[in-house]
Image (cartoon, rainbow, N blue to C red):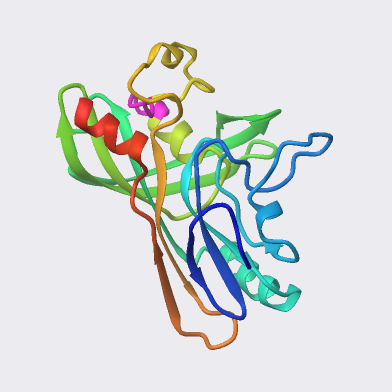
Amino acid sequence: MRTAVPILYEDKAVIALDKPAGLVAVPVKGSRTPSALDLVPGAFVVHRIDRFTSGVLLFAKTERDREVLVRQFLEHTPVRQYLAVVRGHVRQEEGTLAHYLRKQGQHQRLSQEGEKDAARAELRYAVERTFRGATLLRVTLVTGLQNQIRVQFSAIGHPVIGDRKYHPKEAEERRIDRVALHAARLEFAHPRTGRRVVVESDPPADFRNLLRAL
């Protein structure tokens, strides 16, 4: 399969793209906006990453392969790691965040355990580097809710730089024009062989430029 974006990994069962920020993962209903799925005709969606997040995006080449992979994601067995640049200094070098979130429209809102439609969100993080007024984190998802990283770090007072969806003031950020979030690593069991597959993506130029500017 030929695409307009780099292919990070491909075999007879799966294909992983290095999705640029701004490209939606799958077609939006009622919109003609191009999507990553359009670049791999005949492929099947396995998981999604946010439109303005860059990095590893996985598709399956057959429905059977998709079923096997989706089951893994539902069981939270793949390792999904992101790089995130957040406001402020995260004091603990590593830790775990756990919240309950409830979707309202296109946003996730903090909720409480037991509330209607509340879902548990959990992640682990480690500090990669500290800057003046910002921290680069490596985040590993335990669950995989929409906007989870953005909402959970916002909840502890460290919003992701450029996240104007949850922090309108971030529209004033000039060093990067999107959310500073990059899907850097994905590990999963191959749907046919069971062997461990590791796919990695280096941060794109805008993400690296932000780090240099901090």
* Residue 159 falls inside the magenta stretch: yes
Q: Which residue appears farthest toward the bottom when viewing the image?
A: 193
Q: Is residue 156 magenta?
A: yes
Q: Residue at x 42, y 16 (%)?
A: 170
At x 46%, y 84%, the residue is 195
The correct choice, above or below, for 113 with respect to 122 in the image is above
Residue 214 visible in this rendered orientation of the protein: no
Task: Please identify the dominant SS of the magenta region.
Answer: loop
Drawn side of residue 135 relative to residue 201, left or right: left
In this view, the residue in front, 54 or 69, is 54
Quadrant that contains the N terminus: bottom right
Q: Quadrant of the C terminus?
A: top left
Q: How many marks?
A: 0
In screen coordinates, is 135 left or right of 60? left
The span picked out in magenta is: 154-161
Residue 60 picture quarter:
bottom right
The residue positioned 51% from the left and 85% from the top of the image is: 194
Residue 7 appears left or right of 153 = right
- The location of residue 205, given as percent across then percent down, is 34, 39
What residue is rendered at 31% in x and 30% in y? 86
Residue 157 is situated, as x and y percent measured from the top left of the image, at 34, 23
**Residue 2 percent across, percent down from the top left:** 61, 63
**Residue 103 in sight in this render:** yes
Q: Tell which residue pokes out farthest to the right in this image.
A: 30
Q: In this rendering, is residue 55 above or below 136?
A: below
Image height check: is 179 above or below 81? Answer: above
Percent from the top left, x then y, of residue 26?
A: 69, 48
Q: Nearer the viewer, residue 143 or 62?
A: 62
